[in-house]
Image (tube, rainbow, N blue to C red):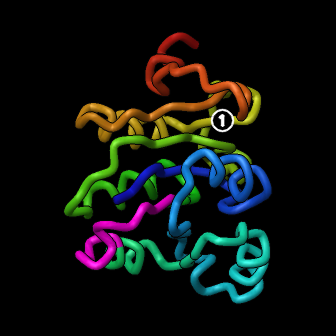
Amino acid sequence: MIALVRADDRLLHGLVAVSWTSDVAPETILIANDAAAKDTFLSNTMKMAKPAGVKMGIKSIEGAVKALNNPINDGKKIFLVVESVIDAESIFNQLNNKFNRLNIGTAGVKKQPGQEYRPTLPQVHVSRADYEAAERPDAQGVKAYIVEREYAYTGDNFTTILADR
């Protein structure tokens, strides 16, 4: 079972490793990212940041979907971390058992050339494609949200916050 999906440009870093992992209390952290799955240095760096007592896997998007759709993982509490909202939507569309919460963390740090980004909060800048990628699963019952201050969840829906700006 996917307890939480977090879209974060930086993937696994201190805040995710400590605060979010403490809050979610997963058995496994699954990083779904094509580049990280191929990059030994990046993978090893994230493995060093992994909290004790939690398993971690780093897989391509395709590999993560296969792992998440494997019935052997149905009873496991998994914290899925992806780089972008677009990756989260791609995974959502391929899952047998859909997730219902998408936390949008530091987004827009790695801006794509030619994309226009809109700040929603100081640490979150989204493109039109990001917004639409959050909106489609939201329409299917996924609560896509951002946290204004990482320790003070506001409960505001991501699409509502964007509509207000």
- Say if 141 sits above or below 22 in the image: above
Q: Position of residue 83 (x, y in %)?
A: 58, 58
Q: Position of residue 6 (x, y in %)?
A: 54, 50
Q: Quadrant of the N terminus?
A: bottom left
Q: Residue at x 74, y 35 (%)?
A: 123
Q: Residue at x 49, y 48 (%)?
A: 85
Q: Position of residue 125 (x, y in %)?
A: 66, 35
Q: In the image as oriented, which residue stretches furthest toward the top?
A: 164
Quickly name the residue at label 1.
125
Considering depth in this image, is 56 or 63 the residue closer to the camera? 56
Which quadrant of the figure has residue 65? bottom left
Q: Quadrant of the C terminus?
A: top right
Q: Which residues are magenta?
A: 68-79
Residue type at mark 1: give it. Answer: His
Q: Is residue 69 magenta?
A: yes
- Say if 139 sits above or below 51 in the image: above
- Say if 35 sits above or below 153 in the image: below
Q: Secondary structure at mark 1?
A: strand
Report the label total.
1
Q: In the image as oriented, which residue stretches furthest toward the left?
A: 96
Dot 1, crowdedness within 10 Å: few (<14), some or many (≥20)?
Answer: many
Considering depth in this image, is 65 or 29 the residue closer to the camera? 29
Q: Is residue 147 magenta?
A: no
Q: In the image as oriented, which residue stretches furthest toward the front?
A: 53
- Say if 130 sits above or below 61 in the image: above
Q: Residue at x 46, y 17 (%)?
A: 160
Q: Residue at x 60, y 77 (%)?
A: 35
Which quadrant of the figure has residue 102? top left
Q: Position of residue 38 (x, y in %)?
A: 60, 86
